[in-house]
Amino acid sequence: MPQTYHVTGMTCGGCARSVEAAIKSEVPGAAVTIDLGAAKVTVTGASEAQVKKAVDDAGFGYEGVV
Ligand SMILES: [Cu+2]
């Protein structure tokens, strides 16, 4: 099941790629879709804790499940 999270601090495509890479580094099989304008990250195949850790480690703001 895909889960959508609110992530702050992403201002450009580079930020979005950094978040995607961080999540895929944490969970290699995860599928990640990012809506930059809405500050939303949708992930399939990773737990909330894994997503939070990846986002935190990449220096962005994890604001919880949407
Ligand atoms: Cu950026």
Image (cartoon, rainbow, N blue to C red):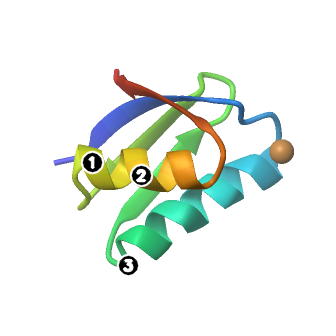
The residue singled out by tag 2 in the image is: 53
**Separation of residues labelled 1 and 2 (CA atoms):** 6 Å
Under tag 3, what secondary structure? loop
Ligand 1 found in image quarter: top right
Describe residue 4's horizontal placement relative to residue 22 as left or right. left
Relative to 26, residue 54 above or below: above
Above or below, 56 against 26 in this view is: above
Please give the residue where the numbered disc 3 appears in the rendered image.
28
Amino acid marked by disc 2: Lys
Q: Which of 66 and 1 is in front in this view?
A: 66
Say which residue appears at 55% left-offset and 63% top-offset.
22
Could you tell me how far apart the alpha carbons at marks 1 and 3 are, in whole angstroms?
15 Å
Q: How far apart are marks 3 and 2 (CA)?
A: 14 Å
Element marked by disc 1: helix
Residue kind at label 1, given as amino acid type: Ala
Left or right? Give the position of 59 relative to 15. Answer: left
Quick one: which residue is furthest to the left in this view?
A: 1
**Of 50 and 30, the residue lying toward us:** 50
Q: In this view, does 25 lie above or below 34?
A: below
Q: Residue 49 got which mark? A: 1
Q: Nearer the viewer, mark 3 or mark 2?
A: 2
| Neighbour tally class for label 3: few under 14, some 14-19, many 20 plus, Cα within 10 Å | few
